[in-house]
Amino acid sequence: MTDFFPLNTGARIPAVGLGTWEADGEACTRAVRFAALEAGYRHIDCSHLYGNEIQVGLALREILGDGGGIKREDLFLTSKLWFTAKTPRHVETCVDASLRNLGLDYLDLYLLHWPTPAPMGDATDPPPAAALEHREEVRQIKESWQVMEALLATNKVRAIGVSNFGISQLQELLGSCLIVPAVNQVELHPFWRQDDLVEFCKRKGIHVSAHTPLGIPGTNIGSLQLPSNSESSSAEGKTFLRTKSVNSPMLKASVVAAIAEELGKTPAQVILRWGLQRGTSVLPRSLTPERIKLNIDILDWCLADDDWKAINAMEPQVRLINGTFSYLSENAPLQAVKEDEVEQAENI
């Protein structure tokens, strides 16, 4: 029953944050300004690659400038570095772009977004590459992390971490790093628990933060086939399209529905509370004010041990973000760092 989790830096990360992936335009600004922060959120999870940091920044400028009592130090802002930025100049240019768009002087947390140049395969395993290609990717991860470590000296970020790293990738990184990642942000939900990864991170002092804790916030990316013996009375033996903001079979699973009814909570609240009781922070994404408020109303109650264990036994285990999906879609509204900006920075 805590609002925060400690990081290995001595800082604290809020237990619930607002995810902003696929939150576009004015709807994104409204979600951050009028719903999330008024509802009590203090962590906003961003990425330059999401293409909406300008919209998040508009909300932050209003919040911090309206005299409403919220100060910069009350907020926890996360952004992410795409893997293709390798040199210190590239990385600092990317950080500067995020800070400029968000209207901030520093980030509380900066993450290496993926362990490979593109999200290939399962984030818990090495990518399906030949040995030589795998060794090259490991080398790139180590070099990129060294650049991330150097970034701390600029005072533009307060902590650094990784995202979508599996055990083998963390082991490679920990074998050479000077600074242990403060956070590993990964896909976590009852249908993709990654128990071994969560336990490994805890042993190494790395906080685990759950993105897509209610399922994948995207459309038209295939379907999820549940086996006939899966834990879902309403979903048994059927194929469901993945919905805009939730994984419908997960929320409709009988075990989740029964717990929610007994507690007078929503299925989403039950799943998010399960995430907190694992010791992981959660980053639900929504643009609906009422749902945003419900998603953070999970801090002053607990799941009983039997209920928590029942959710831990849910099957199947199916990842939702894999090689068939990429952030780099043709129509993605990227606010990318211009190539000429990077070239100019390299020549300074």
Image (cartoon, rainbow, N blue to C red):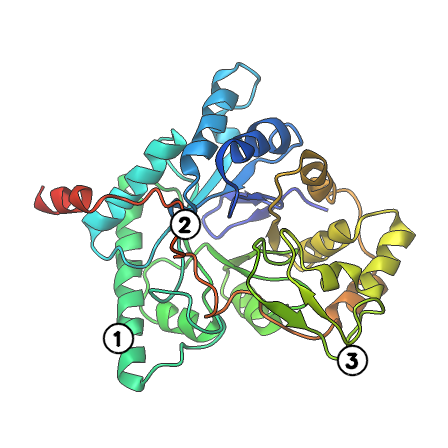
Image quarter where the C terminus lies is: top left
Task: Provide the residue designation for mark 1.
Answer: 136
Q: Nearer the viewer, residue 82 or 210?
A: 82
| Gap between marks 1 and 3 measured at Cα | 42 Å
Give the mark, 1 or 2, whose residue is nearer the N terminus. 1
Q: Secondary structure at mark 3?
A: loop
Per the image, label 1 sits on a secondary structure element best described as helix
- At which x and y percent is residue 88? 21, 51
Q: Amino acid at mark 1?
A: Glu
Residue under label 2: 332
Viewer-nearest residue: 197 or 174:
197
Mark 3 surroundings within 10 Å by alpha-carbon count, few (fewer than 14), some (14 through 19), many (20 or more): few
Q: Nearer the viewer, residue 145 or 103?
A: 103
Q: Tell me the residue that label 3 is attached to.
A: 228
For mark 1, does the 10 Å Cα neighbourhood hold few (<14), some (14 to 19), or many (20 or more) residues?
A: few
Amino acid under disc 2: Ala
Q: Separation of disc 1 and disc 2 at Cα?
A: 28 Å
**Residue 319 on image: x %, y %:** 58, 69
Left or right of 170 in this view: 142: left
Residue drawn at point x = 50 percent, y = 38 percent: 76
Residue beneath the point at 64% across and 27% down = 38
